């Protein structure tokens, strides 16, 4: 049977809407949310026990039907909560699996051992008690390698806090949280939805009005029959989930993108592009303003013996920082797509840190900034089909995009790049962007190499190029050495040596120096 409608993949977007419900309804929703979160903590403990006993989470594990029902209430809410908990834990463990892979790649272990560890990692069998078999050879991985895998995974997990399930949002499907448009306009058109919720009182349901706004009203797509409930800063919000799959499919079909644009991310300039653009040049000034305010409030709270998060002003400014990041990153990338029409974006692995900002604000940026950019890149892929490629950024700001010479002295000042080998001078961010674009052609495994391995590869590659030779008696310009490699620790840290003259010919006393000069 042929389908009457064209199939499309679901693309979900959530808009947070406030409510002006009565005090009694608010109390009922808060009681439901707190019971849901308490049950999530208990379900999390159960799932972690399963994970360390069997090596797997199991969202269908439903042996204890009494305890969780006594906490969360209806059995359907218990099932919804368990699915949500397992999804959150699996996402956290997936990130640790990526760290496991990077740790193994950066190690000096034999290649056979690395292969076995990667096999365990791909299978998620770090704590599994069953045999793990190598694909192709049928070899059973030894107990020693299995133990090493457990130790590495324990190390990766211990570096991060486990998900805090006591603060999760409550996600309810149509069985416990149906949503519908109002039959007629209410409160001057401010009420955009009515949500019907089952409460902790058996048999009691309440209807909650949600206030809409222009951005949500303009979102194309179909609202799904479910709801998210969350409490942030003592305020209840309700997430309305819209399936934009059909609209995104039309957008991808209409978008005519071509070519590749490389992006160098920074906090002084948000993005420098391979097209020579510097986008978001003024946003560091705004970040410094937030930094000053947040640091002042945090210091005041600490002097009073309180935590910074206890201050409503502190939480409000942190939320403002997140909002500023979302707005600015979205604005810049939307303009880039509208003007450049790329088919692919190439970015470095992002690092949200800046020496001009405090450790506190750097931590805030690091915690939310990367996820905001990743979410925006995923949105561009959904709406326009633009793919994004990540490259290893190590030494991209110190490497000359013209000749490949890498030296930290190539960056004499902020924003300026001047190569000590070939004399190429350009904006530092644009030079880094050119390197990022070139690294797109590197093998995929190069993304996960350590900084030391990347440096060794860059030095070796420079030595293999046909570069202009420097005579041993050549004097550098502006105090630069005759051959900058002689005083560059990246090339072995060789210091200049005295040369003796043999007639009209000068010969170096150092074989290593002669080899460098002859290169």
Image (cartoon, rainbow, N blue to C red):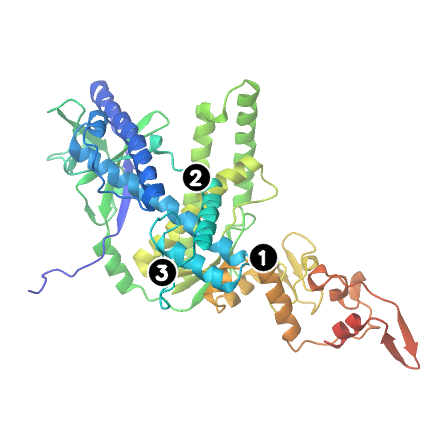
Disc 3 crowd rating (10 Å Cα; few below 14, some 14-19, many 20+) is some
Of marks 3 and 2, which one's residue comes earlier in the chain? 3
For disc 3, the marked residue is 133
Name the secondary structure under disc 2: helix
Distance between the alpha carbons at the discs numbered 3 and 2 = 45 Å
Of marks 2 and 1, which one's residue comes earlier in the chain? 2
Disc 1 crowd rating (10 Å Cα; few below 14, some 14-19, many 20+) is some
Image check: 200 left or right of 233? left
Q: Is the residue 289 above or below the residue 87 in the image?
A: above
Q: Nearer the viewer, residue 99 or 386?
A: 99
Name the secondary structure under disc 3: loop
Q: Which numbered tag is attached to residue 322?
A: 2
Tell me residue 147's x, y (percent).
Answer: 45, 49
Q: Is the residue 279 above or below the residue 321 in the image?
A: below
Which quarter of the rendering shows the N terminus? bottom left
- Seen at 70% across and 55% down, the residue is 412
Q: Comparing marks 3 and 2, which lies closer to the viewer?
A: 3
For disc 1, the marked residue is 451
Tell me residue 86's x, y (percent).
Answer: 29, 42
| Farthest left residue in view | 1
Distance between the alpha carbons at the discs numbered 1 and 3 = 32 Å
Image check: 152 left or right of 387? right
């Amino acid at each position: 049977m042929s389908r009457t409608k064209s199939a499309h993949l679901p693309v979900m977007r959530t808009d947070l809407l406030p409510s002006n419900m009565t005090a009694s309804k608010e109390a009922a929703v808060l009681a439901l949310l707190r019971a849901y979160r308490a049950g999530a903590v208990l379900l999390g403990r159960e799932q972690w026990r399963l994970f360390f006993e069997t090596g797997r989470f199991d969202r269908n594990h439903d042996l204890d039907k009494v305890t969780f029902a006594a906490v969360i209430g209806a059995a359907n809410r218990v099932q919804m909560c368990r699915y949500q908990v397992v999804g959150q834990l699996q996402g956290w463990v997936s990130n640790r699996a990526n760290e496991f892979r990077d740790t193994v790649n950066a190690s000096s272990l034999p290649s056979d051992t690395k292969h076995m560890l990667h096999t365990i990692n791909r299978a998620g069998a770090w704590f599994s008690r069953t045999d793990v078999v190598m694909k192709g050879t049928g070899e059973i991985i030894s107990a020693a390698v299995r133990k090493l895998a457990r130790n590495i995974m324990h190390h990766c997990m211990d570096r991060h806090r486990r998900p805090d399930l006591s603060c999760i949002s409550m996600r309810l499907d149509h069985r416990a949280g149906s949503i519908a448009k109002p039959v007629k306009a209410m409160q001057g058109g401010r009420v955009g939805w009515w949500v019907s919720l089952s409460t902790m009182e058996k048999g009691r349901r309440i209807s909650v009005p949600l206030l809409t706004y222009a951005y949500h009203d303009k979102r194309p797509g179909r609202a799904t029959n479910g709801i998210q409930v969350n409490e942030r800063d003592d305020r209840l919000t309700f997430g309305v989930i819209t399936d934009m799959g059909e609209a995104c499919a039309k957008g991808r079909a209409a978008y005519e993108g071509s070519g590749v644009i490389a992006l160098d991310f920074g906090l002084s300039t948000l993005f420098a592009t391979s097209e020579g653009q510097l986008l978001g040049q003024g946003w560091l000034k705004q970040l410094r303003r937030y930094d000053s305010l947040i640091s002042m409030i945090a210091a005041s709270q600490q002097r009073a013996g309180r935590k910074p998060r206890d201050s409503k002003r502190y939480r409000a400014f942190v939320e403002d920082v997140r909002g500023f990041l979302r707005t600015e990153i979205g604005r810049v990338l939307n303009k880039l797509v509208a003007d450049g029409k790329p088919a692919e974006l190439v970015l470095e692995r992002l690092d949200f840190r800046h020496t001009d900002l405090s450790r506190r604000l750097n931590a805030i940026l690091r915690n939310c900034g990367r996820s905001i950019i990743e979410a925006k890149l995923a949105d561009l892929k959904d709406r326009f089909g633009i793919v994004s490629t990540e490259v290893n950024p190590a030494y991209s700001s110190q490497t000359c995009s013209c000749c490949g010479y890498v030296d930290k002295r190539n960056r004499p000042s902020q924003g300026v790049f001047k190569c000590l080998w070939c004399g190429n001078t350009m904006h530092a961010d644009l030079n880094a962007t050119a390197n990022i674009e070139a690294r797109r052609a590197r093998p995929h495994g190069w993304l996960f190499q350590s900084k030391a391995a990347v440096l060794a590869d860059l030095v070796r590659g420079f030595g293999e190029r046909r570069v202009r030779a420097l005579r041993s008696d050549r004097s550098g310009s502006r105090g630069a050495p005759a051959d900058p490699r002689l005083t560059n620790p990246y090339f072995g840290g060789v210091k200049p040596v005295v040369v003796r003259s043999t007639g009209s010919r000068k010969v170096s006393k150092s074989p290593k120096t002669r080899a460098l000069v002859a290169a």
